[in-house]
Amino acid sequence: MIQVANLTKTFKDPKRGAVHAVDHISFQVRNGEIFGLLGPNGAGKTTALRLLATVMRPSEGTAVLGGYDILREPEAVRRQIGFLSGDMGLYLRLTARETLTFFGRLHGLNGAPLKARIGELLARLDMEKFADTQVDKLSTGMRQRVAIARTLVADPPILILDEPASGLDVPAARVIEEFIIEAQKTGKAIILSTHVMEEAEYLCDRIAVIHQGQIKIVGTMAELRAATGKERLRAIFLSLLGLEALERKAPHAS
């Protein structure tokens, strides 16, 4: 469903010169798979996702999503994906229900099918009690659920999720994690960006560790353990980044 080949984004910095925010990364994501993109802040995760979502244009390389090339067919790519960005992409003066109605109509949904889809999302994401409240009056967790629902209103086959549980308490994060798992079971291809080890280890079928714009390794947890000799994802991650001393200082951390 997703094929990424040598994807690169280079920025010009007056002091540092050429900076490779994303540096020739390649990977594939299958239908029904949650693919984790794990890295520290500034590793290139968000830039990579913006390239895949056609928000930015790559300097080199390309990607094919749902059979469409991000360079040649960006509009077709956008019809295949639901993209959750870090800024949520919400209009504060709209209610949750109005938000879903607005984005549903942008995707060509109307009438009874749109109403039914909104009702389904409100129920599945436990949003019914605040469906008619303006977004600017909602908590962070509630807004994040609205953003997830907005991403899914057109039922796209591909989801690109940038830190979907960032800043949420455990109950709110759990609701979103369960919904991601449900989306996977319907056959969607999902890219999940995170820097939370527990989230990646729990949700992802395969994980790519990215650092300084480059992918250090891609594999299942079993493959990552075999490659590094480490058991927990935190230890694997620190080993790949050359930061094993931090693990030795906190041997009992997850």
Image: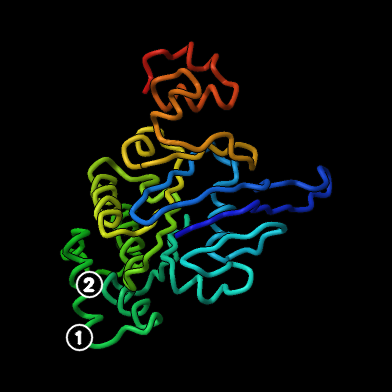
In the image, residue 14 above or below residue 93:
above
Q: Count of labels shown? A: 2
Residue position marked by numbered label 1 in the rendering: 112
10 Å crowding of disc 1: few (<14), some (14-19), many (20+): few
State left or right for residue 142 relative to residue 60.
left
State left or right for residue 75 relative to residue 170.
right
Q: Which is nearer the eye, 198 or 135?
A: 198
Instruction: Tell me where residue 57 appears, x and y as whole percent.
Output: 65, 64
Instruction: Tell me where residue 223 appears, x and y as whole percent.
Output: 44, 30
10 Å crowding of disc 2: few (<14), some (14-19), many (20+): some
What kind of residue is marked 2?
A: Asp
**Residue drawn 26% across the image and 60% down it:** 186
Quarter in which the C terminus is drawn: top left
- Estimate the spatial distance between the alpha carbons at disc 1 and disc 2, rounded to whole Å: 19 Å
Instruction: Tell me where residue 44 appears, x and y as whole percent.
Output: 60, 46
Residue position marked by numbered label 2 in the rendering: 132
In the image, residue 45 above or below residue 95:
above
What kind of residue is marked 1?
A: Ala
**Residue drawn 44% across the image and 60% down it:** 1
Q: Which is nearer the eye, 234 or 94?
A: 234
Please report whichever mark, 1 or 2, sits nearer to the chain's N-terminal start: 1
**Residue drawn 60% across the image and 42% down it:** 42
Instruction: Tell me where residue 251 appears, x and y as whole percent.
Output: 41, 13
Q: Which is nearer the eye, 200 or 14?
A: 200
